[in-house]
Amino acid sequence: MTIVRVMTADAVLPSRIQTTPGPAMRSSSLLSVFLLAAMAASPAPAKAANSDMNKHSADSATKGGNGDDPFLWLEDVEGERSLTWVRRQNAASIELLGNTDGFEKLREDIKAILDSEDKIAYVGKMGDHYYNFWQDAEHPRGIWRRTTLAEYRKDSPAWETVIDVDALNESEGKRWVWHGANCLQPDYARCLIALSNGGKDADVTREFDLINKRWVKDGFYRPEAKGSLGWIDSDTVFATTDFGEGSMTASGYSREVRIWKRGTPMNDAPLVFKVKHEDLGAFAARDHTRGFERDFLYRVPAFFRGETFLLDKDGGKHKIDVPESAQPSVHREWLLVELREAWDIGGKSFPAGSLIATKFDDFMAGGRDFTALFTPSDTTALSGHTWTRHHLVLNVMDDVKNRIYVLTPPADGKAGEWPKQAMPGAPEIGKVSVSAVDDETSDDVFMTVTGFLTPTTLFHGPLLGEKTALKHMPATFDASGFEVSQHFAESRDGTRVPYFQVSKKGMKLDGKNPTLQYGYGGFEVSMTPSYADTVGPGWLAQGGAYVLANIRGGGEYGPRWHQAALRENRLRAYEDFAAVSEDLIRRGVTSPEHLGIQGGSNGGLLMGNMTVLYPELYGAVVCQMPLLDMKRYNKLLAGASWMAEYGDPDTDDWQFIKTFSPYQNVKPDVDYPPVLFMSSTRDDRVHPGHARKMMAKMSAQGHDVMYFEALEGGHNNGAENANRATQKALAYAYLKQRLFPKD
């Protein structure tokens, strides 16, 4: 097991690391204790959870100013007046979009894709079984199931159901959404199951007997909160959660780590670690690797900042003394450090974006002899790394294209050069990711290969040997008439900004092609090619072109690409996105009346700013789960945790934040493109008040706007495939209605 420190997670990232993951690269920037522990959360019974959210909004309205905001009442998440407004907007949107030609067929087609029994069932190995979480038409909330490798190799494996979430809901009268399982190594007899009532980040944890497939009576149980339980041994867990007054940070995560013994009250568990109220949170995890069992504590003052401590048996805490911006990870005898800033150490200089290694015990004893395993160039960045039993696998992006390398630690176990080779069997074209099947015992891996027009294939086999294709995702549209190309636009300051274009072969460059441009641009999240399973039938097959923009704020070129658009430099992300749009227009791909844009979460903030800052470039906007009121974002739900990214609006930072706060900058006398705002009542990460208020304000100013709010499903867009299909179909119907030439 690799233990890493919190680094990444914002509004749109996955809310947790599943114990049954797809074969994604276990990256030090994506695998994080924050995702494993803190973001693994969801709501309690709806009434209690919603009253908490409403109280948060009311309290922050009192404390946060904006008393002259006539739409502040829309922050009352489930107030009667707010929900009446939401239902009225939803009805109007369904009336206008749901009755368009082809809408119902498109929705059913997308739902069929999401429900398809032929899609790849990604698995994670625990003991002798391979586990998968699965949703389809018969199991809308999903089943957690398992099989053997021999069965998994078959076209139609025999699966054994472990937990049926739909059956659980029926028996308990709940609306549980699966939030993952944490099972105790090495026997995997007991699991800690996280369940969300409706899809929020806040959730409950319950103990499950995996041998007898039943809930443990009087077992470990954590009430609803943003938090988690993590195994230490069969009778002991780390607990991070809401322990009562003063135990949560301003960002809504636990300040405390406690060690909780079976059979004792959770709130009586001894406190072993506590962070400041203004920090993002406190987290803990045990590395269960046999022979290398260690406990780690994590203080996270802000995104991309943190401290990691080794907890000894006597309760002593020993800091892993690396820069606060760096990300350490410990695997067996090795300490890896991924640098976000340059570091001079041990007589050597390592640039930002490097991955360096040393012996963990030597480092804790004062040694500082590091070896560089990866050093970035102008076009390359480390996308992630994963361990097998004897090797380290690096996923490197070169101009947003994956390259896989295998490194071997020195045979004598001492610090020194690590031999490196390209991984055999990795394709030259396409998005590639690798994960270990079992990093304690084997060098076997899962490898996935995908591309915009190439359905995903899952391979299995030895890291340095021939791999066999196990599973193929079915094609969801005829891609034979399309092609993918990569282009580079020049931003306002001369920066070269890449983007991918998916369009018909031989497309006329006459400026009349309906084009959808997607972007994110934040939190060091990279936008990379993946199969257009629903974009294909929903947009490409309808006659549109699709563009994915790799703007600054993301991680496509490592930390420097992210840091270039932080805080006072945020406008660079929007300049990059505009540069891509202008390049599409210049090249004759499209024109403003046929160019639509889409993004969610931080990408929703991007959409809001493109609307108010560059209205002349676009014919339609789909703005999903957005941040928009940047004057109050830090007072709403998890907003305070993102101040390292955007700044603190209650300080002089407001002078630059106000330049990218769409809610404050929208004006009645500007001709804006039409906008569809989409949000979720159950989103307890990005407050739905952002989208509600922006919709209400723009509507009052006379602009062309629409609104749709899912009543459950949380930030990650729907608790069931039917919900997800409806939202996707609404977005495509809206874009088609606005961007396609009128007959």
Image (cartoon, grey):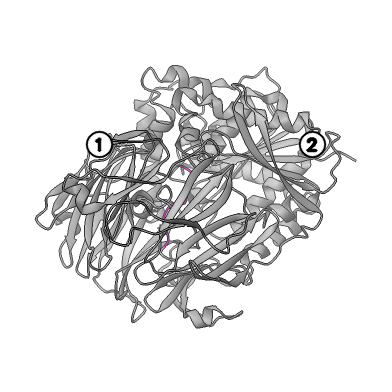
| Quarter of the rendering occupied by the N terminus | bottom left
Q: Which mark is residue 339?
A: none
User: How crowded is the residue under tag 2: few (<14 C-alpha within 10 Å), some, or many (20+)?
Assistant: many
The answer to whether residue 206 is magenta is no
Stretch in magenta: 11-18
Of residue 347 and residue 309, the one placed in the foreground of this image is 347
Query: 643 above or below 403?
Result: above
Query: What is the secondary structure assignment of the residue under circle 1?
Result: loop
Residue drawn at (78%, 40%) of the image: 514
- Give the image location of residue 74, x and y in percent: 50, 35
Query: What is the secondary structure assignment of the residue under circle 2?
Result: loop
Residue tagged 1:
277
Residue drawn at (32%, 74%) of the image: 188
Residue 642 lies left or right of residue 679; in this view the side is: left
Name the quadrant containing residue 183. bottom left
Name the quadrant containing residue 350. top left
Instruction: Please tell me how many numbered marks the rendered image carries.
Output: 2
- Disc 1 marks a residue whose amino acid type is His
Q: Is residue 558 visible?
A: yes
- Disc 2 marks a residue whose amino acid type is Val
Q: Which residue is most to the left?
A: 314
Of residue 218 and residue 344, the one placed in the foreground of this image is 344
- Judged by its main secondary structure, the magenta piece is loop
Of residue 442 and residue 206, the one placed in the foreground of this image is 442
Name the quadrant containing residue 424. bottom right
Residue tagged 2:
589
Residue drawn at (25%, 68%) of the image: 290
Residue 106 lies left or right of residue 421; in this view the side is: right
Structural distance between the alpha carbons of marks 2 and 1: 51 Å
